[in-house]
Image (spheres, rainbow, N blue to C red):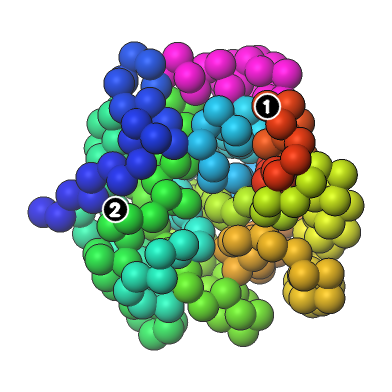
């Protein structure tokens, strides 16, 4: 059995189990988080969410808003898409089998879903190496392990090709397999990178507005015309596509903040958003 060992434990989040659980709880209780612990008592029934993927000290509290929204669900499968920052492996890669390991334990890859999505779209390769070093999917797992006490499986999908056509095809394939079992979808992305705080807010607002309209054509138009440096734009677009095809009719911005808003260092920031599709 293949074991995907942690690549960023001890850097993006604590590698000690007790410290990690404490850090996650602090994210939920933080002023940039939901301000309360899971589960969510509201009957929102999200289909998918957008989450950031920086270190927990920077984006964890913003991400906690999305995890709070899905915390009362009991999915059998969590599909997680995110950008391949290292450019290793295939343009679009899922994992066929094995487990992902974190300080909180192991999460099993859904082999049945992996084979099915590969059959649904040959663009989606099945590959272990593509996933070995990147953080965009990994940082979501401890949050999921903390909010869910039941056993669930994951389908990790990491993306190099984030073009409009690729994102649409991936989103449709995700929707197709999600109809067969109780599924929640996570699109992993940060927004504007390494600009001053006010500029980041201005850059990200029209892109977020397009997401809230669930308008993928407008999303790509704003992305390209405004040169927004959102690293996981293909993950966002594929999540939007899948959620719409699964019946989502609205999107809600749960929280937007930059690393500068969180830490106070506003000279060179990264933007983060938690968005809920239902």
Label 2 residue SS: strand
Residue 237 appears at what percent x and percent y? 66, 67
The residue positioned 57% from the left and 74% from the top of the image is 162
Q: Is residue 8 visible?
A: yes
Label at residue 109 = 2
Up/down of 234 relative to 154, above or below: below
Label 1 residue SS: helix
Label 1 environment density (alpha carbons within 10 Å; few <14, some 14–19, many ≥20): few
Total numbered circles: 2
What separation in Å lies between label 2 and label 1 (alpha carbons)? 35 Å
Q: Is residue 34 magenta?
A: yes
Q: Is residue 225 magenta?
A: no
Residue 238 appears at what percent x and percent y? 60, 67
Residue 268 horizontal side relative to residue 137, left or right: right
Up/down of 9 relative to 20, above or below: below
List the residue tagged with mark 1: 263
Label 2 environment density (alpha carbons within 10 Å; few <14, some 14–19, many ≥20): many
Residue 112 horizontal side relative to residue 240, left or right: left
- Give the magenta part as a residue range: 21-42
The residue positioned 39% from the left and 85% from the top of the image is 122
Earlier residue among tags 2 and 1: 2
């Amino acid at each position: 059995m293949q074991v995907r060992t942690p690549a960023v434990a001890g850097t993006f989040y604590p590698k000690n189990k007790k410290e990690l659980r404490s850090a996650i709880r602090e994210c939920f209780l933080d002023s940039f988080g939901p301000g309360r612990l899971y589960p969510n008592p509201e009957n929102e029934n999200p289909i998918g969410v957008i989450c950031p993927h920086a270190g927990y000290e920077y984006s964890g509290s913003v991400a906690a808003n999305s995890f709070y929204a899905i915390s009362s669900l009991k999915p059998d499968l969590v599909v997680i898409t995110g950008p391949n920052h290292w450019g290793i492996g295939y343009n679009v890669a899922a994992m066929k089998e094995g487990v992902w390991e974190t300080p909180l334990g192991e999460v099993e890859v859904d082999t049945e879903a992996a084979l099915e999505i590969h059959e649904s779209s040959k663009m989606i390769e099945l590959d272990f190496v593509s996933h070995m070093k990147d953080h965009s999917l990994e940082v979501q797992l401890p949050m999921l392990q903390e909010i869910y006490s039941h056993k669930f499986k994951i389908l990790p999908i990491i993306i190099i090709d984030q073009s409009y056509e690729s994102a649409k095809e991936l989103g449709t394939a995700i929707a197709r397999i999600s109809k067969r079992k109780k599924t929640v979808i996570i699109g992993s992305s940060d927004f504007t990178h390494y600009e001053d705080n006010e500029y980041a807010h201005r850059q990200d607002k029209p892109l977020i507005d397009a997401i809230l309209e669930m308008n993928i054509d407008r999303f790509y138009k704003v992305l390209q015309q405004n040169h927004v440096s959102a690293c996981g734009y293909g993950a966002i677009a594929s999540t939007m596509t899948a959620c719409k095809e699964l019946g989502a009719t609205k999107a809600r911005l749960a929280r937007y903040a930059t690393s500068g808003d969180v830490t106070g260092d506003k000279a060179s920031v990264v933007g983060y958003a938690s968005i809920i599709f239902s």
